């Protein structure tokens, strides 16, 4: 495995890389969810590039940019074991050169849900992902379905900006108790970690209601909120039932819907989601070009 720190060197390496090339963009602090993305990319590509870059523009005031876990040595080990060929680990000024002012605004889809609660977050995400796409020029890019809104936004910018990259959504990797793997889980104490499992449990409660025929989004939200409220260490920030593509709220699950939530557990802010179709059983979001 080769570690690359400059844009110029990355472009040179890409020019001689065997196609197809798969990109796994990360902010480091890698866990098995990231390793799963790399393994998927490894299975489908001749060359795998994993980026390690804590992107400052997607953190708002008071968020955890300064304290976001940085575990480079472990990240390199995880990357290599999972099958990475090239690690792109640039400094901030390689991605954001002095005097640069260009920002990618994903539009209305970036202003709801996470975008509403973290203003400007998705401009930072869309900008850095567009830069990585322009630098690495991958044939495919791999993202976890845990960050459901992010995945949809990346599909939108891929379409709108005509990158022509295959965007692959990979199912959320969970701990045995259902908690979605996240770099921020390391902020949790043992007691908070136990409590955090209520998030996935609340989604499963809503899913069971849906399976029994409940289609009112309000009823599904109440079920989630009541389940989470029973765990005093967890504070709900929002719960949503939205159209799976536009992410606009819906009153009735009469189409493919995304049920998503955000909550605080100690100093960690955690998100999770599930998809509900209008038909008989939940389905994943799959892939898109």
Image (tube, rainbow, N blue to C red):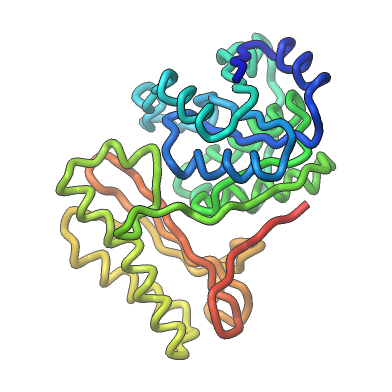
Q: How many marks?
A: 0
Q: Which picture quadrant has residue 21?
A: top right
Q: Nearer the viewer, residue 67 or 79?
A: 79
Q: Which picture quadrant has residue 255?
A: bottom right
Q: Does the image show residue 127? A: no
Residue 4 to residue 252: above or below: above
**Residue 257 image position (x, y, % from top left):** 57, 71
Q: Does the image show residue 50? A: yes
Judge from the rendering whether residue 182 lies leftward or rightward of residue 96; answer left or right: left
Q: Which picture quadrant has residue 97?
A: top right
Query: Which residue is at a point 35% across and 62% down the rendered structure image?
Result: 200
Query: Which residue is at a point 53% across and 27% down the rendered structure image?
Result: 80
**Residue 167 image position (x, y, % from top left):** 71, 47
Q: Nearer the viewer, residue 7 or 263?
A: 7
**Residue 272 image position (x, y, % from top left):** 42, 56
Judge from the rendering whether residue 108 lies leftward or rightward of residue 232; answer left or right: right
Residue 197 to residue 126: above or below: below
Q: Nearer the viewer, residue 37 or 115?
A: 37
**Residue 62 image position (x, y, % from top left):** 36, 30
Residue 219 to residue 275: above or below: below
Q: Dividing the image into 4 quarters, which one contains the N terminus?
A: top right
Query: Which residue is at a point 54% across and 25% down the rendered structure image?
Result: 52
Query: Which residue is at a point 78% across and 14% down the rendered structure image?
Result: 12
Most extreme residue toward the bottom is 213
């Amino acid at each position: 495995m080769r570690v690359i720190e400059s844009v110029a060197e990355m472009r040179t390496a890409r020019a001689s890389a065997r196609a197809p090339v798969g990109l796994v963009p990360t902010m480091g602090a890698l866990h098995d969810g990231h390793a799963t993305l790399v393994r998927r990319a490894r299975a489908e590509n001749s060359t795998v590039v994993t980026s390690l870059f804590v992107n400052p523009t997607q953190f708002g005031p008071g968020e955890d940019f300064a304290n976001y876990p940085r575990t480079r040595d472990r990240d390199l080990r995880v990357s290599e074991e999972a099958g990475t060929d090239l690690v792109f680990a640039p400094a901030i000024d390689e991605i954001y050169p002095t005097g640069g002012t260009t920002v990618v605004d994903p539009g209305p889809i970036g202003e709801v849900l996470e975008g509403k609660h973290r203003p400007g977050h998705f401009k930072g995400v869309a900008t850095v992902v567009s830069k990585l796409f322009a630098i690495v020029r991958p044939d495919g890019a791999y993202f976890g379905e845990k960050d459901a809104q992010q995945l949809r936004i990346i599909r939108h910018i891929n379409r709108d900006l005509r990158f022509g990259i295959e965007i692959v959504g990979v199912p959320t990797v969970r701990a045995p108790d259902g908690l979605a793997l996240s770099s921020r889980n390391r902020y949790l104490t043992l007691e908070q970690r136990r409590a955090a499992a209520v998030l996935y449990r609340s989604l499963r409660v809503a899913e069971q209601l849906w399976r029994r025929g409940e289609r009112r989004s309000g009823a599904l939200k109440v079920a989630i909120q009541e389940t989470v409220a029973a765990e005093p260490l967890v504070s709900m920030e929002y719960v949503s039932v939205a159209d799976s593509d536009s992410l606009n709220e819906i009153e009735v699950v009469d189409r493919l819907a995304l049920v998503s939530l955000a909550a605080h557990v100690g100093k960690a802010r955690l998100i999770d989601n599930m998809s509900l179709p209008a038909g008989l059983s939940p389905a994943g979001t799959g892939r898109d070009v």
